[in-house]
Image (spheres, rainbow, N blue to C red):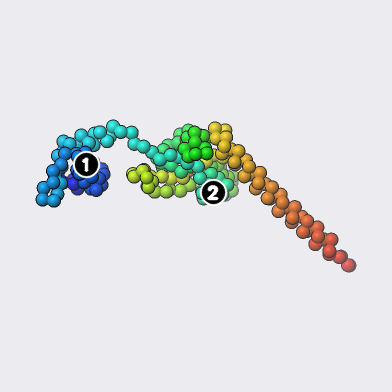
Amino acid sequence: MNTTAAAAQAKVTVATIRIWCRNGVIAATKTAGRWVIAAASLARRIEIGARRVTALPPMVITSKTHTPGVLGVVGPAAQLAAAFESGTPVTLGGTKVAGEQVYLGHSRTIYDDGLTVQIQGLDSERGEHPNFPGIACAVYLVDMTRLDAAPTIKAAAEKALARSLDRAAATERAAYQAEARVAANTSYDC
């Protein structure tokens, strides 16, 4: 069997097959500058590979979502989709929040011809992970109302909300003061 057929059978690249041949991972001989691969050896290698648990990239928190003020989780798309559909929490990796769990799904209200509550999970697709070939990644929105199993994230979210409310109050006070100054400087001669 040649390298192209072996790559198709093993579902790897031709370059990977050549590396396996050079390193003796599979039985192969080089004839006229081309690798001839023993089918039984390749089948055994495929079987060994199937037994190994496929490593997945860690799920990490991100503030870069399409919905302002709502956090997201970046991770394997299939795993995030399953957690969103089943309503189960995902465990985060990373450094500051490792081990914390969040639920997926951001509720938003839509005012169309009535009042509709929509729960949005998928925020964006990220494509294949650069360090985990074949693993598609995505960003799913976090349910910001269910952060009890994520104390670090909950504290940061509460702090951000408090800052936002303080800024809104300061803006309102400044507008009121400006209005009062204009009213004080305006004379009403009738």
Say what amino acid the circle numbered 2 marks: Thr
Measured from the top left, where is residue 146 in percent x and y?
Answer: 56, 35
Q: Nearer the viewer, mark 1 or mark 2?
A: 1
Mark 1, residue position: 23
Residue placed farthest to the bottom in the image?
190
In the image: residue 170, left or right of residue 68: right
Q: Image point 58% across, 45% down: which residue?
A: 109
Mark 2, residue position: 67
Say what amino acid the circle numbered 1 marks: Asn
Q: CA distance from mark 1 to mark 2?
A: 49 Å
In the image: residue 7, left or right of residue 83: left
Q: Image point 43% across, 42% down: which residue?
A: 75
Residue placed farthest to the right in the image?
190
Q: Image point 52% across, 39% down: which residue?
A: 96
Asked whether residue 7 is in view, the answer is no
Label 2 crowd (10 A; few <14 / some 14-19 / many >=20): few
Asked whether residue 63 is in view, the answer is yes
Measured from the top left, where is residue 64 in percent x and y?
Answer: 51, 49
Q: Secondary structure at mark 2?
A: loop
